[in-house]
Image (cartoon, rainbow, N blue to C red):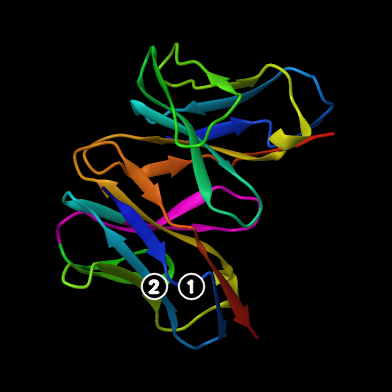
Amino acid sequence: EADIYQTPRYLVIGTGKKITLECSQTMGHDKMYWYQQDPGMELHLIHYSYGVNSTEKGDLSSESTVSRIRTEHFPLTLESARPSHTSQYLCASSDGRYNEQFFGPGTRLTVL
Amino acid sequence: AQSVTQLDSHVSVSEGTPVLLRCNYSSSYSPSLFWYVQHPNKGLQLLLKYTSAATLVKGINGFEAEFKKSETSFHLTKPSAHMSDAAEYFCVVSETGGFKTIFGAGTRLFVKA
């Protein structure tokens, strides 16, 4: 079944740790996105990709980085986590003319 | 340029009464419009979409929305609210054939028993 997956769903870590949030999709979509969302707030685009070896920064400045080596995989990395990175991170993919986006379940990150 | 305005940050209704969540947009291009729902600690789920076909769009769970170009609106409605409808709703505009996608700030729907 075509879907989009994110792991882990919840992560609690200490300041200064390096972390990678995983996102994979089996839809064959070229476009993928990372959003940051604080509880009860709007979504902010932090990274996107048009396809393999294509990555761009989004509207919200972020200290995270992304890579797109395979179509189905779009991991997000924080080299040194800080409490200000505490948030929910949502991954999405889309294809076609209308940019209908399909979302993963999200990763809720807490940095102590 | 594109923008989306959700006119209410919170809407409260009683179970069994109609729901109206308001969304206005602006777009320099022919837009595609979407409504998504987000339940607590979950990702976003597509409710319905407008992509330049019929202006009255029916979605899942009894929701529908009408695209009104003259009013630049895309309001979401449901005839009868259910407790399970309590969630955050996002109106989204996208550039048809392009890439740019803009999310509204969200409307939280409360449903009272």
Callout 2: SS: loop
Quadrant in the picture for the C terminus of chain B: bottom right
- Determine whether B38 is above or below A69 in the image: below
- Determine whether B103 is above or below A67 in the image: below
Q: Do the residues marked 1 and 2 share a common chain?
A: yes
The answer to which quarter of the image holds residue B110 is bottom right
Report in which chain the residue with disc 2 lies. Answer: B
Residue A75 visible: yes
Label ID, residue B43: none
Q: Magenta residues: mostly which secondary structure?
A: strand
Report in which chain the residue with disc 1 lies. Answer: B
Q: Are marks 1 and 2 in contact (CB under 8 Å)?
A: yes
Q: Is residue B23 magenta?
A: no
- Determine whether A15 is above or below B94 in the image: above
Q: Residues within 10 Å of mark 1 (few under 14, many from 20)?
A: some
Callout 1: SS: loop
Three-letter amino acid code of the residue under disc 1: Asp
Q: Mark 1 or mark 2, which has the lower sequence index? A: 1
Residue A71 horizontal/vertical position (percent): 40, 18
- Determine whether A91 is above or below B61 in the image: above
Three-letter amino acid code of the residue under disc 2: Arg
Residue drawn at x 49%, y 15% as measured from the top left: A67
Q: Which residues are magenta?
A: B34-53
Q: Is residue B44 magenta?
A: yes
Residue A65 horizontal/vertical position (percent): 56, 19
Residue drawn at x 70%, y 34% as measured from the top left: A85
The answer to which quarter of the image holds residue B13 is bottom right
Give the labeled residue for mark 2. B22
Residue A28 visible: no
Give the labeled residue for mark 1. B8
The answer to which quarter of the image holds residue B11 is bottom right
Residue B30 placement, left or right of A92: left
